[in-house]
Each structure stands twice: as C-alpha cells, then as structure tokens.
C-alpha cells in the first residue's frame, strides 16, 4: 500500500475509535513501524491527528470534551459494559457520590434497582435515578455548566465538604504516567473535593482516555482504588496502573 493509501486508512481508523496504538496500525496497514511513523508525522503536520506516546489520537473539534451529548455518543457500547461492571462494586445501603460524565451516567443506569443514598452534581444522573423508589438522590447545588449539565463551583464544593461517602465513582479526561487529568478547572476543583470525602475511589474510563493528558492535572494514579475500563486497554497501560497498586477491571 502506498503512503497516500495508508494515510487515508489511518484517518478512517481514527474516525472510528479516536485513539489507535502503533502496533495495531502496523497490523492494519501491513506496514513497517518506520513507515507508519512517517505517515503519522505527515498527518500531524497537516493537523489531521495528534501523535501521542504509543500511537495517535484524532483531533477533536473544539469543546467536545465539554459536551455531554457528544461524549455520550462515542464508545457507547464500551461505556455501557463499564457501567455494569462498576455498578457491581456498589453494595446496597452505601452512600455513593456519582460524579458527572457520560460513563458515570452508564453506572447510574446499572444502579437503578439498588438501595442507596446517591449524591451527585449531574442533572443527567438525577434524571436517570429520579423514579427509583430505592435510591435517595441528593443534588449538590452550585452553578449549572450547561453543556456538561453539571453543577460546579463554590456552592457545590461547600456541600461536598460536609459529607462522607463510602464510594466515589468518577470519570476523567485523561490517564497518563503523570496521573489523572480533566479539561476544566471548575470540574477538577469539585472532583478533588469528592476524592477527599470518599473512602473508596472508582474511576471509570474507556481506553481512549489512556496515554493522553487533559489540560488540568487532577490527582496521581494511586488516588484510585479501582479503575474500570474496556477490554481494549493495552497491557502497558494496565501494568502502569497496577504498578501504582490500582486494581484494574476490564469490561
């Protein structure tokens, strides 16, 4: 396959899954690592992708990380499986903080038949749970961030400061050797408060969140007790988490 054909194929693969590792590209294109690297450099120079450690990422339209509806549509099947596995970690009678985000919303859908006290700053999660007779839902209050449909800011953090929770389930924007990260200062601020008041931290993230760093550093990897992700996670990323004593569950 000529370079132009390989590069067209790379663009198609990234449209489908956002991140793809170098080994997979070599197999899909039946090409050497050096040839694929040259293709990635060429595409990056055209602004069509971003090279990252171990592979390449699609270039997202501005603001996608901050749009709940767009995030809900991508990796939807993987997120549904992640939600079911993460819900299995929750026991009846517990107090659970559910952070915002499309993957955590999938966890909420799998919790509807549990008996729980849920604290959330997410309107979509409140909508998922509002008809459950077994779940008591408390909203944090705060400033409504419209596109994320989250309540954030000082009032949200003040409310969180006065509680204690058995479990926090949270999503993130990126996972790298440096730790967990997210795309917005206000989001990171309340997430840090959630971590403070929870006895157990469960992070839910599909494989595209790995080998990337969002704008704002959130916390080191060892703040998580469990990370639930999809079965496409690379062995290297699993080993990275386990080296920080984080339990990894694949959905």
Image (spheres, rainbow, N blue to C red):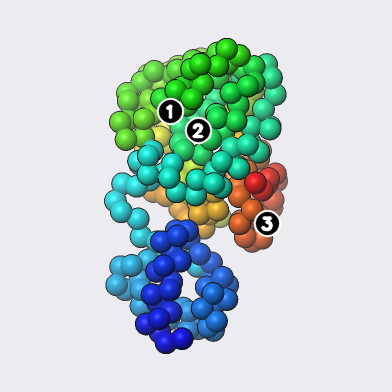
Tell me the residue that label 1 is attached to.
124
- Residue 216 visible: no
Alpha-carbon span between mark 2 and mark 1: 7 Å
Residue count near mark 3 (Cα–Cα under 10 Å), binned few <14, some 14–19, many ≥20: few
> Tag 2 or tag 3, which sits nearer the N-term?
2
Is the Cβ of the residue at disc 3 closer than 8 Å to that at disc 2?
no
Q: Is mark 1 on a helix, strand or loop?
A: helix
**Image height of 198 relative to 83, above or below:** above
Q: Which residue is drawn at 45% across and 53% down?
A: 213
Q: Is mark 2 on a helix, strand or loop?
A: helix
Residue 159, numbered label:
none
> Tag 3 or tag 1, which sits nearer the N-term?
1
Give the percent coordinates (x, y) of residue 75: 49, 49
Tell me the residue that label 3 is attached to.
239
Q: Which residue is drawn at 40% across and 81% down?
A: 5
Give the percent coordinates (x, y) of residue 231: 64, 53
Give the percent coordinates (x, y) of residue 99: 49, 30
Tell me the residue that label 2 is attached to.
105
Give the percent coordinates (x, y) of residue 19: 48, 60
Alpha-carbon span between mark 3 and mark 2: 27 Å
Q: Which of 224 and 42 is in front in this view?
A: 42
Drawn side of residue 126 relative to residue 92, left or right: left
- Which-is-in-front pick, marks 3 and 2? 2
**Quadrant position of residue 80:** top right
Alpha-carbon span between mark 1 and mark 3: 33 Å
Is the Cβ of the residue at disc 2 closer than 8 Å to that at disc 1?
yes
Q: Nearer the viewer, residue 88 or 66?
A: 88
Residue count near mark 2 (Cα–Cα under 10 Å), binned few <14, some 14–19, many ≥20: many
- Residue 239 visible: yes
> Tag 1 or tag 2, which sits nearer the N-term?
2
Q: Residue at x 39, y 48 (%)?
A: 215
- Which-is-in-front pick, marks 1 and 3? 1
């Amino acid at each position: 396959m000529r370079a132009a054909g390989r590069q067209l194929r790379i663009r198609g693969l990234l449209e489908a899954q956002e991140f793809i590792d170098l080994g997979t590209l070599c197999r899909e294109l039946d090409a050497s690592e050096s040839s694929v690297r040259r293709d990635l450099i060429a595409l990056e120079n055209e602004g069509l992708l971003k090279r990252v450690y171990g592979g390449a990422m699609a270039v997202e339209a501005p603001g996608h990380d901050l749009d709940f509806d767009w995030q809900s549509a991508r990796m939807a099947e993987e997120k549904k499986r992640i939600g079911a596995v993460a819900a299995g970690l929750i026991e009846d009678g517990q107090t659970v903080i559910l952070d915002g985000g499309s993957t955590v919303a999938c966890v909420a859908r799998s919790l509807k038949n549990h008996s729980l006290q849920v604290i959330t700053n997410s309107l979509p999660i409140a909508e998922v749970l509002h008809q459950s007779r077994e779940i008591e839902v408390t909203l944090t209050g705060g400033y409504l961030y419209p596109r994320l449909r989250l309540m954030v800011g000082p009032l949200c953090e003040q409310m969180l400061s006065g509680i204690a929770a058995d479990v926090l389930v949270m999503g993130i924007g990126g996972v790298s050797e440096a730790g967990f990260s997210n795309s917005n200062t206000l989001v990171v601020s309340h997430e840090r408060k959630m971590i403070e008041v929870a006895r157990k931290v469960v992070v839910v993230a599909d494989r595209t969140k790995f080998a990337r760093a969002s704008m704002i550093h959130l916390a080191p990897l060892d703040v998580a007790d469990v990370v639930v992700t999809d079965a496409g996670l690379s062995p290297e990323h699993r080993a990275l988490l386990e080296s920080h004593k984080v339990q990894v569950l694949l959905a």
